[in-house]
Image: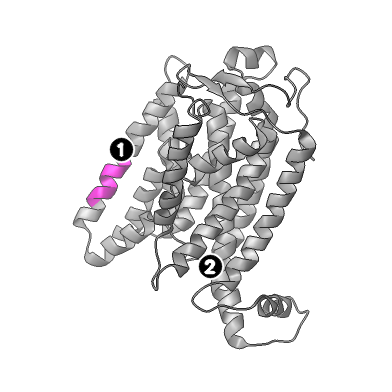
């Protein structure tokens, strides 16, 4: 059920909503569709996630027909006899965990991006703005360079959270955390961790350098069922919790003073959303490396389809993000005989889309027309 909107909020339909970005720039978003049409769109995109997942399991250097994919899955749950062992190995051991992980990471990054943009009231904010990617890269670098008891994924997650914790601590000014100060602190912390990661690349051996470069460029070639067992449930739960914050983010978009007058304390709400979105981002980065553009562009696509209401933007971002990353991963493992880092694919597709938004919808991005 879609979380209800407080009566104090303006209705979801009507004229385009206007607010202010972080710098006071007018922010215009398209007039939203009716609730029934938006719910239908959510259902369609959720079904599209399942369709793209099945197609993704089928495609690759060795194409497997959909009937054989279904037979392998049925055999694994005891509904059919065991079939082709090669099909079973390719589908169950290689492709299915990779596809599920790609979908979960895409949903987590896109959902976190939508939450960040709503929290900071700025459509150009993305999940890595507070230094989580640089911190995760630092943690991965330590795991590669030094023999530590924790896995690379655990170190990346841990230091991604540490980076945002440092950012949040440094941004406190006279008992408050202004948005601009928070973002600037994220830039400082991210630059610090990025500098140390660059040092790792400079002093590392050829093997260590290769591992660091492949990790930072992103990819799902390391996907395992152990990763799926952790990331998929956590991503689903995190996206659902952010969805429950949707109507509060609608209030927060009106400004801190208006939010307080409507009974919402902006500082604790902002802190909860940042912590949850950061945890989702750090979890995604820890298993996939740094995949850029997803958290920036997918929420824009969602708002273009359903308007500014975060009750719909957040779940639609999750479904579109899952589809986008799964498709990009399909391209990454089929466009070339080797493995192409997925960040190359997302940047190739995301860059032109951002140019399109800048050229055609500058006010939607918070720029003066």
- Please identify the quarter of the rendering in which residue 135 is found: top left
**120 up-or-down from 345: above or below:** above
Circle number at residue 191: 1
Circle number at residue 30: none
Please indicate whether residue 54 sits to the left or right of residue 147 in the image. Answer: right
**106 up-or-down from 208: above or below:** above
**Count of numbered badges drawn on the protein:** 2
- From the top left corner, tell me how far across and down residue 192 is, in percent: 29, 38
Q: From the viewer's side, name the closer residue of 100 and 325.
A: 325
Residue 198 is a magenta residue: yes
Kindly identify the residue that appears in the image at 64 percent across and 67 percent down. 54
Please indicate whether residue 231 sits to the left or right of residue 262 in the image. Answer: left
Count residues near mark 1 (Cα–Cα under 10 Å), then give few for <14, some for 14-19, many for 20+.
Answer: some
- Which SS does the magenta portion mostly show? helix
Question: Which of the two discs, 1 and 2, labels the residue nearer the N terminus?
Answer: 1
Q: From the viewer's side, name the closer residue of 82 and 323.
A: 323
Element carrying mark 2: loop
Kindly identify the residue that appears in the image at 58 percent across and 42 percent down. 111
Q: Which residues are magenta?
A: 193-199
- Please identify the quarter of the rendering in which residue 81 is found: bottom right
Please indicate whether residue 136 sits to the left or right of residue 29 in the image. Answer: left
Element carrying mark 1: helix
How far separated are the C-alphas under marks 1 and 2? 32 Å
Please indicate whether residue 327 sits to the left or right of residue 336 in the image. Answer: right
Res 210 visible: yes
Circle number at residue 224: 2
- From the top left corner, tell me how far across and down residue 72 is, in percent: 67, 79
Kindly identify the residue that appears in the image at 61 percent across and 22 percent down. 252
Residue 86 is a magenta residue: no
- From the top left corner, tell me how far across and down residue 154 is, in percent: 46, 55
């Amino acid at each position: 059920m879609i979380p209800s909107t407080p009566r104090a909020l303006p209705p979801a339909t009507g004229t385009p909503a206007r607010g202010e970005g972080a710098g006071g720039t007018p922010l215009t978003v398209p007039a939203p569709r009716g609730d029934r049409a938006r719910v239908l769109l959510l259902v369609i995109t959720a079904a599209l996630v399942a369709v793209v997942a099945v197609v993704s399991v089928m495609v690759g250097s060795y194409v497997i027909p959909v009937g054989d994919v279904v037979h392998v899955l049925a055999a694994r749950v005891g509904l059919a006899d065991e079939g082709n062992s090669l099909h079973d190995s390719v589908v169950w051991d290689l492709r299915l965990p990779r596809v599920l992980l790609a979908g979960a990471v895409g949903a987590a990054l896109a959902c976190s991006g939508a939450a960040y943009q709503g929290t900071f009231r700025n459509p150009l904010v993305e999940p890595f703005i507070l230094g989580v990617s640089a911190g995760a890269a630092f943690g991965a670098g330590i795991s590669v360079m030094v023999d530590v008891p924790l896995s690379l994924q655990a170190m990346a997650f841990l230091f991604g959270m540490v980076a945002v914790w440092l950012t949040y601590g440094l941004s406190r000014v006279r008992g408050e955390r202004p948005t601009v100060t928070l973002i600037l602190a994220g830039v400082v912390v991210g630059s610090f961790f990025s500098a140390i990661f660059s040092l790792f690349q400079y002093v590392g051996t050829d093997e260590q350098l290769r591992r660091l470069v492949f990790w930072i460029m992103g990819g799902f070639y390391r996907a395992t069922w152990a990763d799926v067992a952790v990331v998929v449930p956590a991503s689903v739960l995190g996206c659902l919790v952010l969805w429950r914050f949707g109507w509060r983010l609608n209030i927060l978009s009106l400004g801190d003073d208006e939010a307080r007058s409507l009974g919402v304390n902006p500082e604790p709400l902002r802190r909860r959303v940042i912590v949850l979105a950061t945890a989702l981002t750090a979890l995604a980065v820890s298993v996939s490396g740094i995949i850029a553009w997803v958290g920036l562009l997918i929420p824009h696509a969602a708002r273009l389809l359903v308007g500014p209401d975060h009750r719909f933007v957040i779940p639609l971002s999750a479904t579109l993000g899952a589809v986008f990353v799964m498709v990009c991963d399909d391209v990454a493992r089929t466009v070339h005989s080797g493995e192409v880092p997925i960040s190359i694919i997302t940047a190739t597709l995301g860059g032109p889309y951002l140019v399109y938004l800048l050229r055609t919808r500058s006010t939607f991005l918070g720029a003066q027309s």
